[in-house]
């Protein structure tokens, strides 16, 4: 027979089994809920990641475009500076060349004048004695004062006399 202790044990067993069933059902429901929440979280995180990626890509493209614009502007500025420097170096080189050329022409002119004077004096030395003195006097009066004037910058007395006679 069934005694009250057995009934109590059976009822307790049923209560424990029902509680275990509820706990298991709640666990299953919680797990499904957690899975659903996790799936929603994953979808939300994926959407956030896609949005962040798109934003980062847009920022990177904007940065790249800005860096490219800065690089182009820098290159144009450097090219302008390089062209200006080249033009300045060319102008300095041309001025130096012109100065050297002018000095060379002046030096050649002076050497030519010295040679002409030397040749005239040699020719004067070949003349007969009575003419030699007059020619040398003429050369010393006309050629030497001009050379002295070139060095001083002021006309000689012979040149002033010659300009008054003309």
Image (cartoon, rainbow, N blue to C red):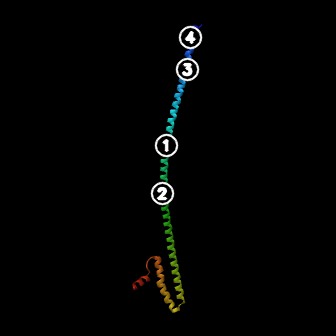
State the SS at label 3: helix
State the SS at label 1: helix
**Residue corresponding to mark 2:** 76
Work out how far the residue at label 1 is from the one at label 4, CA to CA, in angstroms. 67 Å
* Label 1 crowd (10 A; few <14 / some 14-19 / many >=20): few
**92 lies above or below 166:** above
Work out how far the residue at label 4 is from the one at label 3, CA to CA, in angstroms. 19 Å
Could you say where residue 156 lies in the image, as x and y percent from the top left?
44, 80
Nearest-to-viewer mark from 1 and 4: 4
Could you tell which of marks 1 and 4 lies nearer the N-terminus?
A: 4
Residue under the image location 51 percent in, 76 percent down: 105
**Residue corresponding to mark 1:** 54
Nearest-to-viewer mark from 4 and 2: 4
Work out how far the residue at label 4 is from the one at label 2, CA to CA, in angstroms. 97 Å
State the SS at label 4: helix
Could you say where residue 160 lies in the image, as x and y percent from the top left?
42, 82
**Residue corresponding to mark 3:** 21
State the SS at label 2: helix
Work out how far the residue at label 1 is from the one at label 2, CA to CA, in angstroms. 32 Å
**Residue corresponding to mark 4:** 8
């Amino acid at each position: 027979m069934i005694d009250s202790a057995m009934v109590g044990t059976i009822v307790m067993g049923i209560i424990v089994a029902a509680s275990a069933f509820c706990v298991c059902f709640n666990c299953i429901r919680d797990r499904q809920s957690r899975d659903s929440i996790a799936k929603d979280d994953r979808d939300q995180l994926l959407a956030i990641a896609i949005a962040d990626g798109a934003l980062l890509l847009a920022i990177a493209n904007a940065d790249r475009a800005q860096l490219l614009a800065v690089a182009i502007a820098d290159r144009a500025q450097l090219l302008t500076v390089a062209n200006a420097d080249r033009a300045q170096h060319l102008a300095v080189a041309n001025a130096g060349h012109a100065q050297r050329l002018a000095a060379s022409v002046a030096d050649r002119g002076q050497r030519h004048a010295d040679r002409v004077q030397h040749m005239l004096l040699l020719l004067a030395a070949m003349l007969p004695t009575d003419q030699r003195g007059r020619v040398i006097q003429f050369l010393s009066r006309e050629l030497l004062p001009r050379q002295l004037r070139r060095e001083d910058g002021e006309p000689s007395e012979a040149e002033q006399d010659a300009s008054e006679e003309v």
